[in-house]
Image (cartoon, helix red, strand yellow):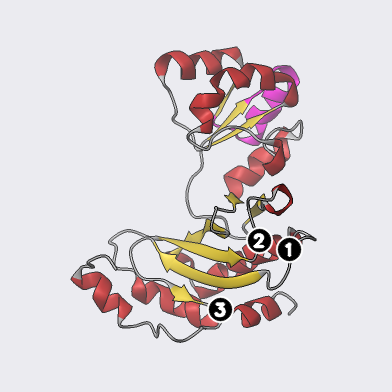
Amino acid sequence: MPNRGKKYKAALEKVDRLNRYSLSEATELIPKLSYSKFDATVNIAVRLGVNPRHADQMIRGAVVLPHGTGKPVKVLVFAKGEKAQEAIDAGADFVGAEDMVEKIQKEGWLDFDKTIATPDVMALVGRIGRILGTRGLMPNPKVGTVTFDVERTVKELKGGRVEFRVEKAGIIHCPVGKISFGAQKLSENILAVVDMLMKLKPSTAKGTYVKGISISPTMGPGIKLDVSQVLSALNQ
C-alpha cells in the first residue's frame, strides 16, 4: 500500500472498511472524506462480471446524469452546412470542418472536452484520428457522437452526459458529480449510471454481473457500497 499523508489517513479513519454502505449512507459520508480545498469530483467504480477480451462483453456506453457533472464542458462539432448551424444554435463551443481539422493538425489545438461529428465528415476527421484517439476525443458511433442528431447530442454533452468503457480488469470508472451536490443529487446520478450498466448487460455474461460498487472523492478514500441495496433502489 502506498505511503499516505496525514489528511488521507484521518479521512480513512471515518470509513469502516469491512462495511458495505447503503447508497444514502455513502452519499452522506462522502463530503467528510474529501480533504481538497476545491469542490471535488465524486467518482464511481463498478466492478463487473464480464471478460472484456470477448467483443460481446466489451461494455461501452454513455449516460446523461440527471444533475450533470458540475463541470463546464467545451464541445467541438465537426459538421457542414445546416448541421453546422444546428450545432451553433444548440450551444456548441466550436463548429467547423476542414478549418478545425487544420487547426488541430497545425497548431496542436485541443482546447475542448468532447467532440461530435456528422457521418458525412468522418473521413475528414479521420485525418486527425491519432491525435484525438490517444486523448479519448475521437467521435464514436458506439457512444452516439457520430450522428446527424446534432442538437440533441450537443445539449446532452453540455448538460452532463458521461461516457464509460470497461477496463481490462472489468471495471467501469466515471464521474457522478461534485461534493457540493449533496446526497440526494449524487444518489440519483449514481443510480442513473448503474441503471445504464444494467441495460447494457451482455447475454453472454455468466454469474454475478455487478460484483462491486465504490465511490470516492478526487482526494480521499473510497466507500464500498452494498450492491444488493443499490440494485433494489433502482426499482423503487
Q: Which residue is drawn at 56% across and 65% down?
A: 46
Query: How far apart are the alpha carbons under marks 2 and 1?
Result: 6 Å
> Can the viewer see residue 35?
yes
Mark 2 touches mark 1? (CB < 8 Å): yes
Q: Determine whether 104 is above or below 139 in the image.
A: above
Residue position for label 1: 205
Residue placed furthest toward the left: 6
The residue identified by callout 3 is 23
Residue 225: % across, % down? 53, 78
Where is the N terminus found, in terms of image quarters?
A: bottom left
The magenta region covers: 78-93
Q: For residue 89: magenta?
A: yes
Q: Where is residue 175 in the image (x, y as percent from the top left)?
A: 51, 57
Helix, strand or loop at label 2? It is loop
Residue for point 32% across, 77% down? 12
Residue at 54 percent across and 17 percent down: it is: 101
Q: Give the quarter of the figure containing the C terminus.
A: bottom right
Q: Residue 50 carries which label?
A: 2
Towards the viewer: 58 or 36 = 58
Amino acid type at mark 3: Leu
Bin the neighbour count of mark 1 within 10 Å (Cα to Cα): few under 14, some 14-19, many 20 and up: some
Horizontal and vertical percent for residue 134? 49, 33
- Which disc is residue 137 wearing? none
Numbered disc 1: secondary structure: loop
Query: In whole angstroms, how far apart are the C-alphas of marks 3 and 1?
Result: 25 Å
In magenta stretch: residue 221: no
Mark 3, secondary structure of its residue = helix
Which residue type carries mark 1? Ala
Report whether 196 appears left or right of 162: right
Q: Which amino acid does label 2 sit on?
A: Val
